[in-house]
Image (cartoon, rainbow, N blue to C red):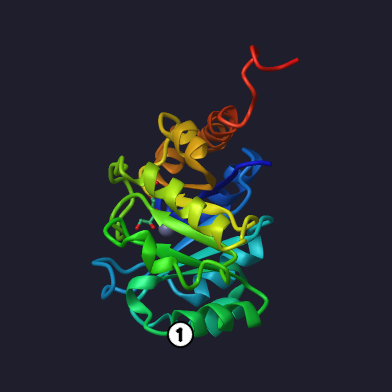
Amino acid sequence: MTVQIAPSILSADFAALGSAIAAVERGGADLIHVDVMDGHFVPNITIGPPVVRSVKRVARVPLDVHLMITDPDRYIDAFAAAGASMMSVHVEVLPHLHRTVHAIKALGVKAGVVLNPSTPVVALEQIAGDVDFVLVMSVNPGFGGQSFIPRSESKVQEVRALLDRAGNTSAPIEIDGGIDHNNAARVVAAGARILVAGSAIFHAPDPERATRELKAAAMAALTPSPSSAR
Ligand code: DX5
Ligand code: ZN
């Protein structure tokens, strides 16, 4: 059992993405998290398939593409072709979520479903057995650098229980928003296994080191304490 760290390039210098990615990879990044925003679902506009294609050329770890857009069905083919290994879509915009999840899988991409902070876990009830992962937003999506919403911790526990009830014990929970070395161990203890971090990594003086330290903080929650070790 391990925890994966997914640095979000939203907080990196877009003029120097190649070196930003290389630095976090040296620090042990497991994935590169790519935030796609359309100015409709969220009040910000970021990047599209051409940038993902360029990032794919330089990244050595898989790309985790988070679609914060109102009409993901129109773009999943393009992001798969651009090099996404994981793609997540928001339940809030998808009346036909089952179809979208299976369309992503049919492209050979791992399919994730995302819940905004105000979206109840029950929204996943009928899809929990189909997903490859669930992304719990711990801030309202749209911007990096926001504060972690504490209630997200119990939400991760609830999602874990739902996935287990659905028999989907291998689907990991990803958490995104306000993650740093202070709360990493807590969210891992709650059940998160993929930690997204933007500002805590790319606004740190040394992103390579920040990645390594975040991973160590996260992994500490999985390591038995000395008193319980034999
Ligand atoms: C927020 C994005 C996040 C963001 C996280 O809408 O989905 O991935 O980059 O940034 P931090 O870690 O700074 O909250
Ligand atoms: Zn994200």
184 w.r.t. 105: above or below: above
How many dots with numbers?
1
Dot 1 alpha-carbon crowd within 10 angstroms: few under 14, some 14 to 19, many 20 or more? some
Foreground pick, 165 / 119: 165
Query: Residue lying farthest front?
Result: 165
Q: In the rendered view of the protein, which quadrant contains the C terminus?
A: top right
Foreground pick, 186 / 63: 186
Location of residue 64 in the rendering, given as x and y in whole percent from the top left corner: 55, 62
Residue type highlighted by circle 1: Asp
Question: Could you tell me if residue 195 is visible in this image?
Answer: yes
Location of residue 226 in the rendering, given as x and y in whole percent from the top left corner: 65, 13
Q: Quadrant of residue 180?
A: top left
Dot 1 falls on a residue whose secondary structure is: helix
Location of residue 36 in the rendering, given as x and y in whole percent from the top left corner: 41, 68
Q: In the rendered view of the protein, which quadrant contains the N terminus?
A: top right
Query: Residue lying farthest right?
Result: 230
User: Is ligand 2 within 8 Å of the beta carbon of the residue shown at mark 1?
Assistant: no
Residue drawn at 61 percent across, 42 percent down: 3
Query: Residue lying farthest bottom?
Result: 74
Location of residue 227 in the rendering, given as x and y in whole percent from the top left corner: 64, 12
Residue 2 as seen in the image, left or right of residue 187: right
Residue 227 as seen in the image, left or right of residue 91: right
Foreground pick, 18 / 94: 94
Residue drawn at 51 percent across, 51 percent down: 160
Residue drawn at 63 percent across, 55 percent down: 169
10 w.r.t. 108: above or below: above
Q: Which residue is mark 1?
A: 73
7 w.r.t. 111: above or below: above
Residue 51 as seen in the image, left or right of residue 152: right
Q: Quadrant of residue 132?
A: bottom right
Query: Residue lying farthest top?
Result: 227
